[in-house]
Amino acid sequence: MPVWQALRQELHTQGFELVTVGLDTLGADGCRNFIEAAQPQHPSLIDQHHVMADLFGVVNIPSSIWIDEQGNIVRPAEAAPAPPKDASEDSGPNIDLPAVMPPRLVEMMGEAVKIPNSSVDYHAALRDWVAQGSESEYAMDEAKVVQRSRPRNEDTALGHAHFELATQLEMDGNHVLAIKHFRLAHELVPDSWTFRRQAWSLEKLGDGPISRFWQGPNPENPEDWPYEGDWLADIKREGAENYNEGFKG
Amino acid sequence: MLLKSLSVSKTDFELGTGWSIKPEGACKGDICIPLPESSIDADSGMLNVNEVASAMNLPLAHEPQAKLWAMGPDSIGGRALSSAKAPELQLPDIDGNEFKLSSLKGKKVLVYAWAPY
């Protein structure tokens, strides 16, 4: 987040504002360390039920939506890489990695570096839009905004409803029932990485800094893992090159 | 939106779904979906969730053990967005202060979704 804050400070005088939204069922407790460390000057919000998915079609993080001065979306949800020189921060918040890396984490990082990164193109486009507004070739018209937003049908819409039930059940301390509805959401909305990553992150491995990044079975009792997939298995199956669509002008 | 019963006030429905209840039906932007007369209780003004959801093709998920329902988003047009008009986004910060995206009208805004996992 610090690199985004620097960008925000730079562009703020040009009528630009950044709004960061932490998607986490654990709410402020889950996001607090990162937000307090960053001390943001911009609005920094918490989204426990992932309304960002319902309202904008967010399916992965980090992603962004661009909105103009009149309140019109000019780019729908898409992958939002960190600025080029700090692309290492792209895959999410920095964490303290253990001195000796477990094989799973090494393998996860090996997949992560294969994820498309359009940082240079994305940030050139962002600066162009901030400078030129609707004249920018990167500001889409309404038809393109709608067409580029995620597909949604009755099944995926129902999956969103199950996800909202799951998050509420989790917040109410009903973890077993939450898993049941997270699983239904995963089945009905197979293209959402956030719905999966959220659920996997709640199956913590220990209490250390990597507990929520493990995103998969505990090697000591893998049979207890309650989900069909996990981050490593899914990215291998789907292909890291398909993890996001990259920046398309 | 989350529901503890299958009867909801107009205000809660409007806040929860972004659709407004008008004489011509449930409306958002240029779209209005007619609602059957029986879906609104004439005395209390409460909406019958099953009937409204059915008329609007909104999905309902249910967890009987917790007596909890969730009504999902519409899928009009087959896309997450049915127009370019940004929907209202109202969320709290870590101190619980509510923020509305619409308060930033007049600025260019980049909404950035991230997660601590």
Image (cartoon, helix red, strand yellow):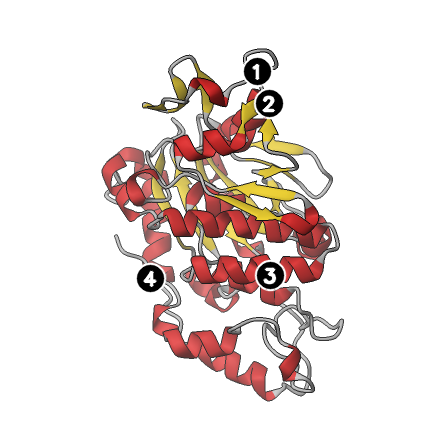
Is disc 2 in the same subunit as disc 4? no
Task: Return the residue at label 4.
Answer: A245
Callout 3 crowding tier (Cα within 10 Å): few <14, some 14–19, many ≥20: some
Give the CA separation, mark 3 to mark 1: 34 Å
Tag 1: amino acid: Gly
- CA separation in Å, label 2 and label 4: 41 Å
Q: Earlier in the sequence, mark 2 or mark 1?
A: 2
Mark 3 touches mark 2? (CB < 8 Å): no
Image x and y of residue B117, in percent: 60, 63
Q: Chain of mark 1?
A: B
Residue ID at (44%, 38%):
B58
Number of disc labels: 4
N-terminal of the pair, mark 3 or mark 4, is 3
Q: Amino acid at mark 3?
A: Lys
Secondary structure beneath dot 3 equals helix
Task: Report the residue marked by disc 1.
Answer: B45
Q: Nearer the viewer, residue A173 or A117?
A: A173
Left or right of A92? Residue A174 is right
Q: Which residue is mark 2?
A: B9
Cα separation, mark 3 vs mark 4, equals 30 Å
Element under disc 1? loop
Tag on residue A180?
A: 3
Gap in Å between the C-alphas at discs 2 and 1? 7 Å
CB of mark 2 within 8 Å of CB of mark 1? yes
Closer to viewer: mark 3 or mark 4 = 3
Q: Nearer the viewer, mark 1 or mark 4?
A: 1
Q: Are marks 3 and 4 on the same chain?
A: yes
Q: Amino acid at mark 4?
A: Glu
**For residue A223, above or below residue B55:** below
Mark 3 to mark 2 CA distance (whole Å): 29 Å
Element marked by disc 4: loop
